[in-house]
């Protein structure tokens, strides 16, 4: 039957689609075949190159063996090569053993200085094994001795210190006061003198939270281990700073850190008061400070922690228990009625802020702490407030800063001068006589104490 024109057009269309599909399939197969052929060529080239390389290596090995006498000039002698390797192994073994024995004797890497042999490079694992055999006393003297803290679970349980736990080992020194006596400078420079000085202020002992302080020490140790190259942390002196500790933490040092060396800074109480008052103005400019005439007693509301009570340096020093406290003359000088600790605390390094620039002071402090590295020079520390970069705050605080010598501050000066005079007599006559109290350049220090008998404003 004769097809219609429309049917013929549809049939031609289907044929065209089939033809296009076949051509696409053919081109795709050709491309895949080309890729397979190219990959085969690359693989063949790689195998050929490898075979050539192995041939060169075999020829070179044979030639070297012939030159060094490992073989007979034609082939390699496995027995002779094995003997050479065994001999080299024995020599290396004996060299390492000698180095290890030298390390056990001297605590230093390499062979003993009396031997003429060249110092071999001892593997780190062998050194670690040798260090494990050293007695504890030698490890503490060893400059590369590593610090290993006991498990925290043996010190703290349920957030509290375990009874009779050895907490004294965690703290070698503490900067405990007074505020505005250069504690920040001392803290900063001890941190750069080969010590582990915890960042910031750690006043956990003020609020009787010894467990939190110990956790902070472990966190600091863990961070140092993580940042070290081989996971080993050297044994160094560790310390903290809290200028408020001298006023309320002596009993906690006696209980938990009785061997910790205590650093205490002082200055003329009148100069100290002016510095602290202006410091508060610069750092909390949004709060109003009370007039100085209202700060002659304790630190009440609105005082921002600035008051004459805190200038009784000798009363707070008496809580460390370094004086006899058995004479009426001594007791009359102490007016706050504070009780000294019942058990001993560590030795005390007392200094005046005027001594910070002295080279002898840095050397004596280094000797007191037993540091191997010199303490760098103490530069002038900026006393700018935290908000001095904001003009409005800076201008406001600058207008309110006081000059303690102005007539309007005469009342607070009279109170502070009385405290300064009593403190000068007690420190010189009682505190300095204790063998546990260390002072750099006593002659200069005594001259500074004598100046406390006078009003610096004239």
Image (cartoon, rainbow, N blue to C red):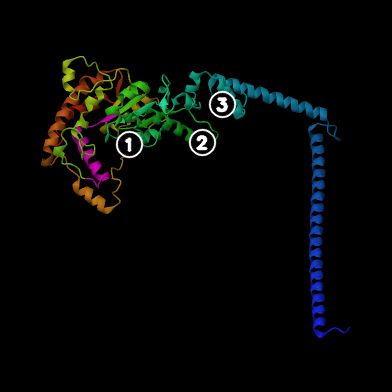
CA–CA distance between discs 2 and 3?
24 Å
- Main secondary structure of the magenta stretch: helix
In the rendering, at what x and y percent does residue 441 appear? Answer: 28, 25
Residue drawn at x 59%, y 29% is: 124
CA–CA distance between discs 3 and 1?
38 Å
Residue drawn at x 81%, y 70% is: 23
What residue does disc 3 label?
Answer: 109
Secondary structure under tag 1 reads helix
Residue drawn at x 81%, y 63% is: 29
Left or right placement of residue 140 versus residue 17 in this view:
left
The disc, 2 or 3, on the residue closer to the chain's N-terminal end is 3
Where residue 415 sits, quadrant-wise, is top left
Secondary structure under tag 2 reads helix
What residue does disc 2 label?
Answer: 226
Q: Is residue 269 magenta?
A: yes
**Residue farthest along the top direction in this orientation:** 326
Question: Which circle marks residue 184 in the picture?
Answer: 1
Q: Nearer the viewer, mark 3 or mark 1?
A: 1
Extent of the magenta region: 264-287
């Amino acid at each position: 039957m004769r097809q219609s024109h429309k049917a013929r057009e549809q049939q031609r269309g289907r044929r065209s689609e089939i033809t296009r599909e076949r051509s696409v399939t053919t081109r795709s197969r050709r491309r895949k075949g080309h890729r397979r052929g190219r990959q085969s060529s690359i693989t063949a080239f790689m195998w050929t190159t490898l075979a050539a390389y192995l041939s060169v290596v075999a020829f070179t090995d044979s030639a070297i063996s012939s030159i060094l006498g490992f073989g007979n000039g034609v082939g390699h002698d496995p027995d002779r090569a094995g003997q050479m390797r065994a001999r080299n192994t024995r020599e290396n073994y004996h060299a390492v053993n000698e180095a290890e024995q030298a390390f056990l004797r001297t605590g230093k890497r390499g062979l003993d200085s009396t031997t003429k042999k060249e110092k071999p490079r001892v593997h780190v694992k062998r050194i670690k094994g040798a260090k494990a055999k050293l007695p504890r006393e030698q490890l503490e003297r060893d400059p590369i001795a590593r610090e290993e803290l006991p498990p925290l679970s043996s010190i703290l349980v349920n957030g509290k210190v375990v009874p009779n736990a050895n907490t004294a080992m965690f703290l070698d020194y503490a900067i405990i006061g007074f505020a505005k006596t250069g504690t920040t400078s001392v803290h900063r420079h001890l941190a750069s003198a080969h010590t582990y000085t915890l960042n910031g202020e750690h006043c956990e002992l003020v609020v009787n939270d010894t467990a939190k302080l110990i956790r902070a020490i472990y966190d600091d140790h863990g961070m140092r281990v993580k940042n070290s190259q081989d996971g080993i942390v050297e044994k160094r002196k560790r310390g903290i700073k809290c200028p408020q500790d001298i006023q309320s933490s002596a009993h906690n040092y006696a209980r938990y850190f009785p061997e910790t060396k205590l650093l205490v800074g002082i200055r003329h109480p009148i100069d100290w008061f002016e510095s602290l008052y202006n410091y508060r103005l610069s750092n909390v400019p949004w709060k109003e400070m009370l007039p100085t005439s209202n700060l002659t007693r304790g630190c009440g509301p609105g005082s921002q922690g600035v008051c004459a009570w805190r200038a009784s340096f000798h009363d707070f020093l008496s809580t460390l228990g370094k004086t006899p406290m058995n004479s009426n003359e001594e007791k009359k000088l102490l007016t706050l009625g504070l009780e000294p600790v019942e058990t001993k605390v560590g030795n005390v390094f007392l200094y005046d802020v005027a001594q910070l620039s002295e080279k002898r002071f840095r050397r004596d402090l280094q000797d007191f702490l037993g540091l191997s590295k010199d303490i760098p020079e103490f530069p002038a520390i900026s006393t700018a407030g935290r908000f001095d970069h904001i003009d409005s705050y800076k201008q406001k605080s600058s207008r309110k800063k006081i000059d303690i010598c102005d007539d309007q501050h005469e009342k607070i000066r009279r109170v502070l001068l009385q405290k300064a005079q009593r403190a000068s007599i007690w420190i010189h006559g009682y505190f300095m006589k204790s063998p546990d109290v260390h002072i750099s350049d006593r002659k200069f220090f005594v001259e500074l104490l004598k100046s406390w008998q006078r009003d610096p404003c004239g």
